[in-house]
Structures are given as structure tokens and as C-alpha cells.
Image: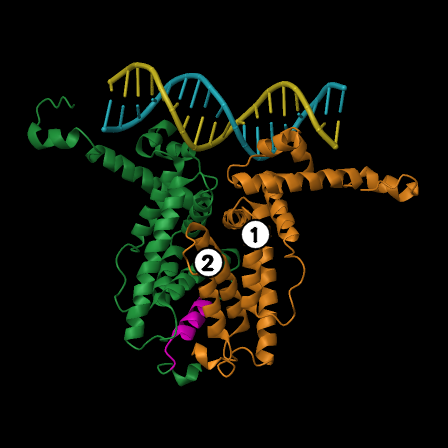
Chain colours: A green, B orange, C cyan, D yellow
Amino acid sequence: MPEEPGGPAEEDAAARSRGPYAKGLARRQQILDRAIEVFARRGSAGTSLRSIAQEIGVSHAALSHYFTSREQLLVEVYREAERQTGESEPHPADASPVEIMTESARRNHAVPGLVQLYSTLVAAGLESGHPDATEFATVRFAAVRADLADRVRRNQALGRMRQDVDPDAVAALVVAASDGLQAQWMLDEEVPQSAALELLARLLADEHTKRPTEA
Amino acid sequence: MPEEPGGPAEEDAAARSRGPYAKGLARRQQILDRAIEVFARRGSAGTSLRSIAQEIGVSHAALSHYFTSREQLLVEVYREAERQTGESEPHPADASPVEIMTESARRNHAVPGLVQLYSTLVAAGLESGHPDATEFATVRFAAVRADLADRVRRNQALGRMRQDVDPDAVAALVVAASDGLQAQWMLDEEVPQSAALELLARLLADEHTKRPTEA
DNA sequence: GTCTATACGTCGATAGAC
DNA sequence: GTCTATCGACGTATAGAC
């Protein structure tokens, strides 16, 4: 219970008694911002709680005050970095699944370390004993697949996409292709990432709307 | 593991003075076999050099005698586990790219922890400062893509695959789809992994050879 | 609520004895 | 070839200052 010497106590008291407040939120945000820089410079593997704390000028225990575990910090750093790319804003309603993932890939590449962090989180999520990463990966995959499957149905209804494909299978396939191609591209920029995604888009396009030059 | 007791001593002396020989190789193999079991049971994330060493009944320093780093051990464990699935044996020459990856996925699922280990190695390989994992992932991706691209060309020559697709793009796409679908499936077995791969195969099949029931 | 100090147990790596 | 011993660094947990 805050002592709050002279301030207007009514609304502040309720707000202040629980949950994070201005200073704490700002601090938390500062931690995330600095963490993004550190991850971009050194990668997520070599970045300890202590090194992030040192960059900010606090003790590593302070970070534990804002994030219950290193893994949760990683997840939140990823979300914040993704948010800063504009990825959280909704994509155009009539965009095709492949267009969505192509645009996402383009945004991801603009943030150093983001693809690596994503890969790290997914890999950790596959292991038991990493509940934060598992939940992150599970929820994210499910949400992206659901969005893409809806877009497939919409594109099919518009006659822009083949009718003889299962929307759920297409959604899983497009997510997998996008993620996998980004990983391959990180290791070898010669990998035809864009060409492969465009190829997939062409294969999924309705045959009657395909431009003859492409066939 | 014959140490060839009565063998000619000349080359033995040279061989024994450096590099591994019978006893050391057997020990190394034993370590890998036990490590595979431990990884299957506990996952790669929670498996330290100490825990593997404990299972074998040696100190963790002994493992460092055979593997220069934990990362190298991880890579070799993956290779050994993959070898034991029969994955190292060549696939039929006329198999299609998607058939190859479908069969590989089937074999991978038979070994607990293998998909997780693979994801961990690829994620580590994307980070700088992990040379062993980086080399593993780079070489493996390049080799698989080269094999698949050859198969695409062969299937195109046989008239079993669309002529209007770039073999290199198809190879990268199929690898990405296979890897990504396995990861998604590990988190949610409802993901239509097989259906998505079969869908991709159908999209890539030559239109004239497609069975009418599928169109 | 925010943060420091401190400590615990574990980790990968390495040096040197046997 | 394997051990013990030790190192520095890690994530986490707790006590308590402010």
C-alpha cells in the first residue's frame, strides 16, 4: 500500500496497489529495447541476463523482477521486435497467404537477429520443460495457420486460388515453407527464397487466372 | 573392435601415436549410443555432458576427450541417430523429391528426440559463434537441396513433373516444407503434415499425368 | 514497487595427476 | 585414457534496503 504523501489518492491508490505502473512499465520497455539491440549484436545464444543487465546498468536480478524467466524475456523480446516492424498491424484482407508470408519475411529480415531468435524459440518450444517457448510457438503457429486458412477460403471464393486444395493443408504448408526458407536463407543467401515462395504462389493460383507467360 | 594383436607393428605404431584407434573408437561409439538414449528420454536441451557421462559411468571430462565441444557431440549424435534409421542409405533413384522428404520424415519420427535435436542444431547454426552447428546445417542443407534438385530434373525428364518449375527453387521449397511441417507437427499432431506434403507433390506433378480424381 | 547484494547449484571447458 | 580439481559464467532464488 503506497504511502503517497501528497498526491490525489483515489484513482492512484487502486491502480498503484497492484500491477505495473508508469515507472515500472517504462523500465520494462527500456529493458526490452536494449535487449533487442543486444540480441541484434550478439545473437540470442550468447546473450545472458547478466549481459543485458550490464548494458542497461542494472543488476541481473532486476531483470528477474520484470520477467519471471529468461525464456519469458526471449518471448517478449521477440514480440516487441515484431511489433516494431509493424507486423502486428493486420495485413490487407484480400492478400493471398503467400503474399502475407512474403511480406512477413521481408519485415523479419529488417531486424537483425529476429530470425535467429524465432528459430531458437521454436526449437526450445519443441523440447519439453520449456513451457513459455512451447506456448509461444503453439499459439503463434495456430494463429497464423488459422489466418492463412481463412485467406485461402476467401481467395478460393474469389476464384483466385485453386478450388481443389484443402485450406488447412495449404496454411500449414505455407507457414512451413516460409519458416524453412528463411532459415535456409540465413545460412546461404544464394537460396532462392523469393523464387521458391513465388513458385508456391503460382502453383496455388487458380489455373484460369494464371497469366499465359507463366505457364 | 579388433586391435589386431599380431599385426605388423610398423603402421600400428604410426596409427597409435595419433588419432583414434580400435579401443578409442569403440568407446566413442558407446558414448554416442548412450547419448542417443539419453536425448530420446530427456531432450537435447536438458541433457548436459555431465548427465550423459553419469549414465555411462565416466566423468564429464572423459567425454571432452572424445568430443571437442558439447556442440560437436550434438552434431555427431544426430548423425549417428540418423544413420541408425537407415537414412544414410541412398533413396531409390527415381523417387520424387516429396517422396524422399516424406520418407525421411517418417524415419525421423521413429527416433524420439531426433526432430527436436535437428531443430536445436539448425537454430544454433543460425547464430554466430557456433561453428560446428553452422557447418552442420549449411552442409546438410546444401547436400539435400542438391540431391533434390537432381531428382526434380530427372522427374521432369521422365515427364512426371511440371516442366515450368525451377529445380533449385523446388528443392529449397520441399526442404523448407518438410522441416517446417515436422516442427509444426511436433507441437500439434492435428497439423495435416502428410496432407500438406501430398498436396505439394500433387501441385508439382505433371498436369497430364495427374489422375482425374485428384483434379 | 523497485532494485541491490548475495548465494546456490549447474554448466562447459581445461589443466594436470595417475 | 581417465580422473579430480578448478575455473568463470550461467539462471534462479531470497533477503532486505529504499
Q: Residue at x 55, y 45 (%)?
A: B130
Work out whether residue A75 or residue A136 is closer to the camera in this orientation and state it. Answer: A136
Residues tagged by mark 1 and mark 2 found on one chain of the structure: yes
Residue of label 2 = B181
- In the rendering, at what x and y percent does residue B141 appear? 56, 58
Q: Which residues are magenta?
A: A193-207
User: Considering the image in quadrants, where does the N terminus of chain B appear?
Assistant: top right
Is residue A101 visible in the rendered structure shown here? yes
Callout 2: few (<14), some (14-19), or many (20+) C-alpha neighbours within 10 Å? many
Residue of label 1 = B110
- In the rendering, at what x and y percent does residue B74 appear? 59, 43
Name the chain under label 2. Answer: B
- In the rendering, at what x and y percent does residue A52 appear? 39, 35
Q: Is residue B80 above or below residue B28?
A: below
Amino acid identity at mark 1: Ala
Callout 1: few (<14), some (14-19), or many (20+) C-alpha neighbours within 10 Å? few
Which corner quadrant of the image does residue B148 belong to? bottom right
* Mark 2 element type: helix
User: Considering the image in quadrants, where does the C terminus of chain B appear?
Assistant: bottom left
Instruction: Say whether residue A199 is magenta.
Output: yes
Image disc number at residue B81: none
- In the rendering, at what x and y percent does residue A114 appear? 40, 50
Q: Residue at x 56, y 50 (%)?
A: B134
Q: Disc 1 vs disc 2: which is toward the camera?
A: 1
* A111 on left or right of B109: left
Is residue A59 visible in the rendered structure shown here? no
> Of helix, strand and loop, which mostly describes the magenta segment?
helix
Which corner quadrant of the image does residue B97 belong to? bottom right
Name the chain under label 1. Answer: B
Report how far apart the C-alphas of labels 1 and 2 lie in the structure: 16 Å
* B132 on left or right of A126: right
- Whichever of callouts 1 and 2 sits on the residue coming sooner in the sequence is 1
